[in-house]
Image (tube, rainbow, N blue to C red):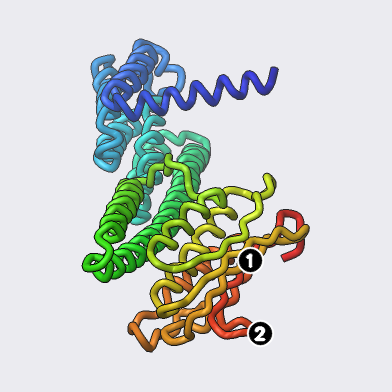
Amino acid sequence: MTTDLSGALQRSTSWVRAFDAARPRVWDTLLTLFWTGAALVDASGGWRNTAADPTLPAGLVAGLTLVSTLPLFWRRRHPAAVLTVLACAALVGQASGAFLQVAYLQAIPLFLIALTRPARTLLWSAALLVPPLVVGALRFAGGGSWDQHVVPTLLAYALVALLGLTVRSRRDARDREVRLAAATERARIAREMHDIIGHSLTVITGLADGGRYAAAKRPDRAAQALDAIGTTSREALADLRRLLGVLRENGTPEPVRDPQPTLADLEPLIAGVREAGLPVVADLPPAPRSLSPGAQLTVYRVVQEALTNTLKHAGEGAEATVELTYAPDALVATVTDTGTEKGRVPTPTPTPNPNTGTTGRGLTGMRERAALYDGTLECGPPPTAGGWRVRLRIPREGSPS
């Protein structure tokens, strides 16, 4: 019963917020008419129950009532100006002895000022609230203490301002979380773009070089190379269009709807590398169901980056081996090649590359991906032979890192 009531209340609140965001003028008009009607009902005679001078002309009371309610229509766009008008009406009401309850509507623009305006505007607004109360207390205190007329009302206004500041603080915190999530998403997409562009261009370069050599002697092989270049280019462009649609400076990135690569996509990846001219031996047992899609994407990108680096730096005659091992406590992906160490970056940190002048950002990206899943990444010559090895270890869920 309580859950159903809470859900209904939440849905109603969401509907009101959505309606307010879509039609703010309608909501402003309804709120203004509501408070104007309520205040005019009080002005028809009920105000005399709290007035210090109940003999005031009805026209004065009605005029003060309208001046205190109609400006609420502009409260969101000009809350400080609205509060100034309401404070002037309250000053006249207090000085004349009307003591109209409609003066409490000053709390509405005060809340909006605390919610949307700088602190100095809030302090200036507080100064507007004091004179009407002091004037009324000094003129009509009678035998009582003037502070009984001033302090409780000021405390009520202070609570309203505090509520506005609290809501503002929570909203700002939520906005910061959204911006942080957007920045994290953009960084993730930037890594994806690096992997797509780097790998695809390397494959295309290898195919183009091979096609140029084969054109004179093996035209059929050159045609195959051109077909592979076209296929790789189209796939890369499709991926880039999808990612660039998400990378936007303004607004929250939309979720990526296309499926991300998994371990099942390693075979097509390796086939493309073979077409580019690098012999690859692969040992790819089926992935366990417990391996999350994010971890599979990390393995895919690390293997992709490692093979791309092999294509770039291993030299002629090099071969590569891709091996996946599923231990009870971890997944281990190893990419080994028989190429030279020239142009390699020995550690997964942004160390300058002596051949290209770059900073090894591909290896840095692999290290960051591994760290997301408490994994480790080792890059360097194998301990027992020449060449180069990239070894990724990702702990299984529930296992120590």
Which is closer to the viewer, label 2 or label 1? 2
Quadrant location of the C terminus in the rendered image: bottom right
Residue at image x 40%, y 44%? Answer: 115
Crowd around label 2: few <14 · some 14–19 · many ≥20 (10 Å)? few
Q: Quadrant of residue 332?
A: bottom right
Q: Position of residue 207 (x, y in %)?
A: 32, 64
Q: Position of residue 317 (x, y in %)?
A: 44, 77
Q: Position of residue 188 (x, y in %)?
A: 44, 57
Label at residue 307: none
- Residue under pointer 2: 384
Which sits earlier in the primary sequence, circle 2 or circle 1? 1
Q: Nearer the viewer, residue 13 or 187?
A: 187
- Secondary structure type for disc 1: loop
Crowd around label 1: few <14 · some 14–19 · many ≥20 (10 Å)? many
Q: Nearer the viewer, residue 222 or 55?
A: 222
Identify which amino acid the numbered label 2 is placed on: Thr
Residue at image x 48%, y 25%? Answer: 13
Q: Position of residue 382 (x, y in %)?
A: 61, 81
Q: Is residue 246 visible?
A: no
- Secondary structure type for disc 2: loop
User: Does the residue at mark 2 contact the one at mark 1 (Cβ under 8 Å)?
Assistant: no
Label at residue 375: 1
Q: Is residue 192 visible?
A: yes
Residue at image x 63%, y 66%? Answer: 375
Residue at image x 68%, y 45%? Answer: 289
